[in-house]
C-alpha cells in the first residue's frame, strides 16, 4: 500500500476534506463474510482455499460499498477485527479496502482500538500509520490517516502512537466514552474527585493534542448512544475531533450530536456501518442503490447540523 | 492453522501442562525485524518483496527461539503488533510461529490486547480463538489457547471474548495492572470508594471466571514491575491465572512474584522475551545457546518459587 503523499497535519487535512466534500460522514467497513452482498460473493474464485475466497469477497464488498457511498462521505473506517479473522487473506483484503478508499478520495481510519506497553505500541504505530525498518529495508504499513487507540495503559503507552501518527501527518482517536452499554462499567466509574473515569481520559486527550487552533491530531471516540455526555466532553476537549459511532443499529441519533460540531463542522465525524451496508434489508432496493441513498440521507442530516 | 484437538477447559489444560513440564515460564515472541539473529536472516529469500523477506526471517527467528527455549517453557506468547506490522507476510509468520509453538508442546497465547464493542469483540474471538463462518465455509482462526484482552469497554464487550474462548477450551487474560510506568495514569486512579480502578477490573475478572476449583479460564495480566499489588490482586482474584510480564528488560524480578503462585504453581505465568532472545548480547555466546541457558535459569528460578 502506497504511503500518503502529503504530510500536512491531520487536523488541517481533515478540515479541508470536510469542507470540500461537505460531509462529516464516515463509511464504516465491517464486512461479515457470512452476510455479503450477492455481487461481492460472485467476485470470489469459484474454488480453492476458503479463507482466500472469503477474503476476495470481503475486499469486493468493501470496493462496492465505497463505490456506492463514497460521494457522501469524507472517510472510511475499517474495523480491523472483521479482516484479521480471515488471516493473511483478510489482511490483504484490508489493504485493498484501504487503497480503494484512498482512490475514492476518502481518508482512511483504522478502527483498531490498539493499546499496549510502549515498545509494542510503537510497533502498532509502525504497522498502521508508519513503516517498519527491517534488515531488508523499510516495510510500508497500512498507511492509515488515523487509528483508534485505547488509553487504558496510560500516557507512556499512547505516546508512541501519537508520535507515530504525527510523524506521518496522521491522527489518533482515543477511546473516551464508547457506544456500548458496558461502557458504563469502567468508563463511568466515579473517581475520588467525583468525576467519572472518562473525564480523565478526556483531559489526557486534550493534553496530548496540544495547543493551537483548528482540529487537533489527537481526537476522541465518543459514542453517539450517550449524547448526554457530549457537551461536557466538548468542554473538556475543545479541539479534539470526535469520532461518533453508534448511529443507527446501536440506537444513536444524528440530531442529538449538535454539541460535537459546535467548534466547527470537522470536529465531529459520524460513523455508520450497518445503516449503509444493510440499508437494502429495509426495502426492496438493490444493495448499492440502497447504500447510496442511506449514505446521502445521513450526510445531509449530519451536515445540516454541523454546518448550520 | 489446525484447530486444537482437545476442548478440555483451559485451566485444566494449563495446570496439567505446568505440572508435566515443571515450568511456568512463557516464551515471549516479539520479533524486531531490524534485530534478528544472523541465522534467521539467512533463512529469508535473497531477493523479492521486502515484506515477504522480512516475514520469512521473522518466522524463522520464532522457530529458532522455540527450538532453543521451548524445553524450559510451558507456553509461547506472540506479540501480535510485531507480526501485523509486516502486513500479510507478517500474519503468515504469526501462523507459522503458532504452529511451531504447538508442535513443540507449548500452549499459544495471542498477546493481542484486543477489546471492542460486542459485535467486533466477537469477530476478534473468531479470529484468535475460534473460527469464522463465511459463505464459503468456516475459516479457522489462529487457534490460540488464550488471548490477552482489554476491559476498558466493560463486561458486555468482554463477554464475547470469554464465551468464544470457553467454547474452544481456551482462555483470556484481562489487562488489570500492566507493567509499564504509565499504567498508573488510569489503572491506579482512586475511585470514590477509595480503591484504585484496577481493583474493579480485578473484581470483574473474578466474576467472569465463575465459581469452581483450579485455575479459571479468565486470567489477569498483572505486571511483574509492581509486585506491591500482587498480594491484593491475588486476594481479589483467587482462581485467576496471572500472566506476569515485565521480568528482565522492564525491571521486574522473579523473586518478588511469590504471592502470584500461592494458590498453586499454574496460577502464575512468568513471561520473558528480550531476556531470552537477546541473552547473547550480555556475553559472547551463540544466540540459541544463550537463549536456552537464559530460559532454563528463569524456569528454575520461577519453578522453585512456584512449586516450593
Image (cartoon, coloured by chain):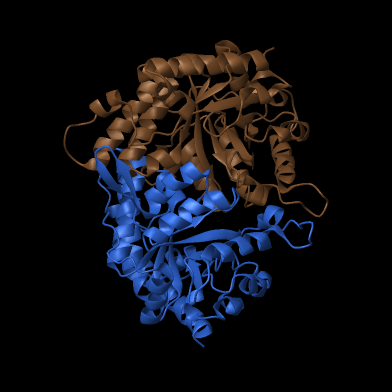
Chain colours: A brown, B blue
Residue at position x 67%, y 60% in the image: B200
**Image quadrant of residue B147?**
bottom left
Report x, y in % for residue B243.
52, 67
Q: Is residue B186 above or below residue A160?
A: below
The quarter of the rendered structure image containing the C terminus of chain A is top right
Residue lying at the far right in this picture: please name it: A193
In the rendered structure, the answer to whether residue B244 lies left or right of residue B86 reads right
**Image quadrant of residue A234?**
top right
The quarter of the rendered structure image containing the N terminus of chain A is top left
Residue at position x 34%, y 70% in the image: B68
Residue nearest the viewer, comparing A6 with B256: B256
Residue nearest the viewer, comparing A220 with A146: A220
Report x, y in % for residue A177.
65, 40
Q: Can residue B178 be seen in this view?
A: no
Residue lying at the far bottom in this picture: please name it: B308
Report x, y in % for residue B232.
67, 72
Report x, y in % for residue B151.
58, 53
Q: Can residue A129 be seen in this view?
A: yes
Residue at position x 31%, y 48% in the image: B92
Q: In this view, does B40 lie above or below B45?
A: below
Residue nearest the viewer, comparing A188 with A19: A188
Amino acid at each position: 500500500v502506497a504511503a500518503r503523499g502529503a504530510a500536512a497535519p491531520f487536523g488541517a487535512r481533515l478540515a479541508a476534506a470536510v469542507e470540500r466534500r461537505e460531509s462529516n460522514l464516515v463509511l464504516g467497513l465491517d464486512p461479515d463474510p457470512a452476510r455479503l452482498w450477492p455481487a461481492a460473493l460472485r467476485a470470489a474464485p469459484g474454488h480453492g482455499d476458503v479463507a482466500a475466497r472469503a477474503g476476495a469477497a470481503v475486499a469486493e464488498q468493501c470496493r462496492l460499498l465505497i463505490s456506492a457511498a463514497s460521494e457522501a462521505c469524507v472517510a472510511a473506517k475499517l474495523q480491523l477485527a472483521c479482516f484479521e479473522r480471515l488471516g493473511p487473506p483478510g489482511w490483504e483484503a484490508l489493504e485493498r479496502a484501504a487503497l480503494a478508499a484512498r482512490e475514492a478520495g476518502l481518508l482512511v481510519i483504522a478502527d483498531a482500538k490498539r493499546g499496549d506497553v510502549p515498545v509494542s505500541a510503537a510497533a502498532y504505530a509502525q504497522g498502521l500509520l508508519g513503516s517498519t525498518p527491517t534488515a531488508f529495508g523499510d516495510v510500508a504499513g497500512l498507511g492509515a490517516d488515523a487509528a483508534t487507540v485505547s488509553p487504558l495503559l496510560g500516557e507512556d503507552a499512547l505516546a508512541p502512537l501519537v508520535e507515530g501518527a504525527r510523524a506521518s501527518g496522521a491522527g489518533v482517536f482515543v477511546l473516551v466514552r464508547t457506544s456500548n452499554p458496558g461502557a458504563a462499567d469502567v468508563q463511568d466509574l466515579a473517581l475520588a474527585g467525583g468525576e467519572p473515569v472518562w473525564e480523565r481520559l478526556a483531559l489526557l486527550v486534550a493534553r496530548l493534542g496540544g495547543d493551537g487552533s483548528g482540529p487537533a491530531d489527537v481526537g476522541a471516540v465518543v459514542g453517539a448512544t450517550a449524547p448526554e455526555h457530549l457537551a461536557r466532553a466538548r468542554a473538556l476537549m475543545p479541539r479534539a475531533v470526535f469520532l461518533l459511532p453508534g448511529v443507527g443499529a446501536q440506537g444513536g441519533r444524528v440530531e442529538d450530536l449538535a454539541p460535537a460540531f459546535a467548534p466547527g463542522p470537522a470536529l465531529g465525524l459520524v460513523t455508520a456501518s450497518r445503516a449503509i451496508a444493510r440499508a437494502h434489508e429495509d426495502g426492496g432496493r438493490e444493495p448499492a442503490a440502497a447504500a447510496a441513498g442511506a449514505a446521502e440521507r445521513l450526510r445531509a442530516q449530519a451536515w445540516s447540523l454541523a454546518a448550520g
